[in-house]
Each structure stands twice: as C-alpha cells, then as structure tokens.
Image (cartoon, rainbow, N blue to C red):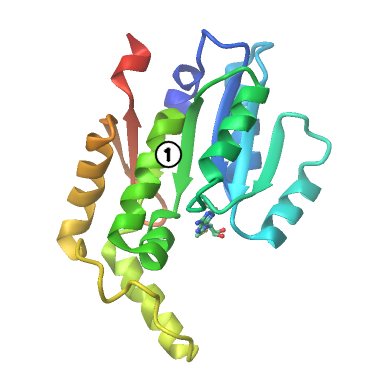
Amino acid sequence: MLKDRSASFISGRGLRAIFVCFQELTCSLQKHLQRERETATPVVVHGIDLDETLVQRARERSKDDPGITFERLDIMDDDAEESLRSYLASAGRTKFDVAFCFSVSMWIHLNHGDSGLALFLGRLSGLCRRLVLEPQPWRCYQTAARRMRKLGEPEFEHMNDIKFRKEELEPFILRTCSESGLVLKQTFGTTSWKRKLLLFEHPDEFK
Ligand SMILES: C[S@@+](CC[C@H](N)C(=O)[O-])C[C@H]1O[C@@H](n2cnc3c(N)ncnc32)[C@H](O)[C@@H]1O
C-alpha cells in the first residue's frame, strides 16, 4: 500500500512532509517514505504513544535521525490536540499530511467507550489531511478480554457498555469519520494481521 501511495501522501505545497504515527512503526515508515520520495524534501515523522518506556526506547533507536521525533502523549487527554498543534506550528504547518493509526482504535474503544472512540477519530480528523487507519475488528476485542481474564486482570472499563460491537463496529467507525469530514478513498485488502487498512482524506485539502 505504501509503495503505491507514498509519493501522493506528501504535500507538494509545504516545505516538508509531516506525518504523525503511533509509536512502533514510525521509524520504518519514515525511512520507507523518504526512500520512496527520493527528493531533497525531508520526510518528517512525529511518533506518539501513551507508554513512556516505548517512547524512550524509540527515541534511543532513532537518536541519529533528525527526521524522527517522539512524544509521550495520551491522545485522549484534553491538552493532546494543543500539544500536536504546537508541534505542527513549530514546523510551520497546520495539519499533518497523514496520520497513521495502526492497531490503536480498539484500545481507545475499550478504555474510553463509544464516545471516546468518536472523540479520538474526530480529533485525528482535525489534525490531518489524510488518515490511514487499521481498526481492530470485534474478534480482537474478544481476544483481548479473554487474555485479561486469563491473567486475572480486571475487565476493560468499557467492554460491556460498548454499543457499537460486532458487525456494528466498522459502520460506526466509517460513519464517525464521515461525520468529521473524512471521505473513505480506498480499502487496502487486509494486513498480515487479517485486518483492513482504510485510507481516508479530507476532500477540501486536495482541490
Ligand atoms: C497494539 S499497539 C500498536 C503500536 C503500533 N501502532 C504498531 O502497529 O506497531 C497499540 C499502541 O497504542 C498505544 N495507545 C493506546 N492508547 C493510547 C492513547 N490513548 N494515546 C496514545 N497511545 C495509545 C499503546 O501504548 C500501544 O503502544
């Protein structure tokens, strides 16, 4: 998917290409996009994650690469948006070219419920021109809940009150994205995790 799309992900209008991404894949993504781009335009990626240890580890791994920064951030915090906006402002931009969000939506949904997932998608939508989303399907929620039970850990806070579950989950995600102005441009088969990869964009940004 990235091979096909990476050139078009990058804005020709800005000084540099900016991406926001959740932790793990950030470094390989930046290298891939920079290689694909094959121009002097730097590809700049800002990785965020809730987990301080993961962020520290990622910083250590990428310390010699000026194109990559990491921030410990809970995207659900009230000041998360402001923090990302100040990152963008420091780069002279108002939006990320693309936000990549792999395997995160379920954790937001389980920990913050339906309204939390809607808030998350709306927040991402307001911050990017395109969104690549790999939402976990309902079977992953069941697996995660089973794992917690086996470990003797408490249930996820919202496992039982999630209204948009099973076959209602994907329509809810699509509807929420659409309500925030994102148009689904493409669905890229399935990843090696047997999950769909959805590409959304804000049509106004590409006129
Ligand atoms: C399954 S991992 C996926 C990591 C990465 N996107 C990948 O595909 O390798 C989910 C990640 O989401 C992060 N996460 C969960 N809730 C978050 C939140 N509210 N804000 C920021 N990161 C969060 C977790 O800390 C975890 O590292």
Q: Which residue appears at 58% of the width and 46% of the height?
A: 25
The one of 26 and 125 positioned closer to us in this rendering = 125
Residue 77 screen position, x and y as percent: 52, 53
Res 19 → quadrant: top right
Q: Quadrant of residue 87?
A: top right
Q: Position of residue 149 (x, y in %)?
A: 41, 87
Question: Horizontally, is 54 left or right of 80 in the view?
Answer: right
For badge 1, the amino acid type reads: Leu
In the drawing, does residue 104 fall left or right of residue 23?
Answer: left
Farthest residue, direction front: 78
**Residue 134 is at least partly visible in this image:** no
Q: Is mark 1 within 8 Å of ligand 1?
A: no
Q: Is residue 156 above or below residue 133?
A: below
> How many numbered markers are drawn?
1
Q: Quadrant of the N terminus?
A: top left
Instruction: Tell me what residue is drawn at x 60 percent, y 39 percent.
Output: 83
Q: Is residue 160 left or right of residue 94?
A: left
Residue, x 34% and y 27% (percent of image)?
A: 201
Would you say 104 lies left or right of 40 here?
A: left
Instruction: Determine the secondary structure under disc 1.
Output: helix
Q: Return the residue nearer the eye: 61 or 74.
A: 74
Give the image location of residue 136, x and y in percent. Answer: 35, 57
The residue lying at 48 percent from left, 39 percent from top is: 100
Q: Which residue is labeled 1 in the image?
A: 124
**As displayed, is residue 58 above or below residue 12?**
below
Residue 63 is situated, as x and y percent measured from the top left of the image, at: 82, 41
Which quarter shows the C terminus?
top left
Q: Quadrant of residue 64?
A: top right
